[in-house]
Image: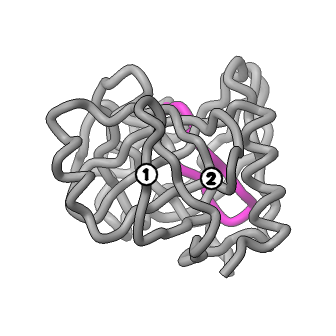
Amino acid sequence: MSIDEASLELIQECVQRKSPVFFSASEVNIVFQTHIMVIKNRSIVLANTVPPEHITAVAQSQQYFLKIHAVRFVSDRITTDGVHILFPLEGLRLIEDSRSAKRFMFDASERVVMEVVNPIDQETVLRKAILDMSTTGLSIRTPMQSKLYSPGQRFEKMKIIMDGKVYNEVDGHVVYQQTFLNQKGKSYCQVGFKFDNAP
């Protein structure tokens, strides 16, 4: 099955903006942040950010996942050109689709953060970098996994701050947290939130 036009446009936009994406494999419990170099020879060419200690497990995986701004694709195989990961467009399947929601794509130079009062102590102000955002939710980066970000935990009056100015204020709850390695190989936790009244 060939990739549809809407998905191809999303991928091309990601290439132009040099937006980060997330690559993972079924036999590895860590997600790898990377970016799309180019679309070439019917493949999505990804910068290879998989550390040597995870290469064997990645190679032995049965499925491979690519998350691009809350849209998640899966493939049964990947290849390599010796340097990059080649994620094939042929046979690519969509397994999580929020394309109907408006997406906000940030340039690498933009500073976009979420600021909120800790719902546990009702005092500490948390300020976290936003990794991606749509009209239905967002994900943030935090140094480590925490019970504070357990699925279901509610956060109220989350301020979305872009270039020092409050863009929006929303309520929502945690839907997941997962460990990821950024493009420099440093370990972080990604926490996903769904906004109230989101479909």
Viewer-closest of 150 and 5? 5
Quadrant placement of the N terminus: bottom right
Mark identifier at residue 89: none
Q: To which residue does mark 1 refer? A: 79
Mark 2 to mark 1: distance in Å? 9 Å
Mark identifier at residue 43: 2
Q: Amino acid at mark 1?
A: Thr
Q: Residues within 10 Å of mark 2 (few under 14, many from 20)?
A: some
Q: Residues within 10 Å of mark 1 (few under 14, many from 20)?
A: few
Quadrant placement of the C terminus: bottom right
Q: Which residues are magenta?
A: 128-139
Question: Residue 94 appears at what percent x and percent y?
Answer: 60, 75
Say whether residue 15 is left or right of residue 143: right
Q: Secondary structure at mark 2?
A: strand
| Residue at screen point 70% across, 18% down | 109
Magenta run includes residue 130: yes
Viewer-closest of 77 and 137? 77
Marks 2,1: beta carbons within 8 A: yes
Question: Residue 149 appears at what percent x and percent y?
Answer: 33, 53
2 or 1: tag closer to the N-terminus: 2
Q: Amino acid at mark 2?
A: Ser
Say whether residue 152 is left or right of residue 69: left
Viewer-closest of 64 and 18? 64
- Residue 122 seen anywhere in this rendered image of the structure: no
Magenta run includes residue 122: no
| Residue at screen point 41% across, 33% down | 82
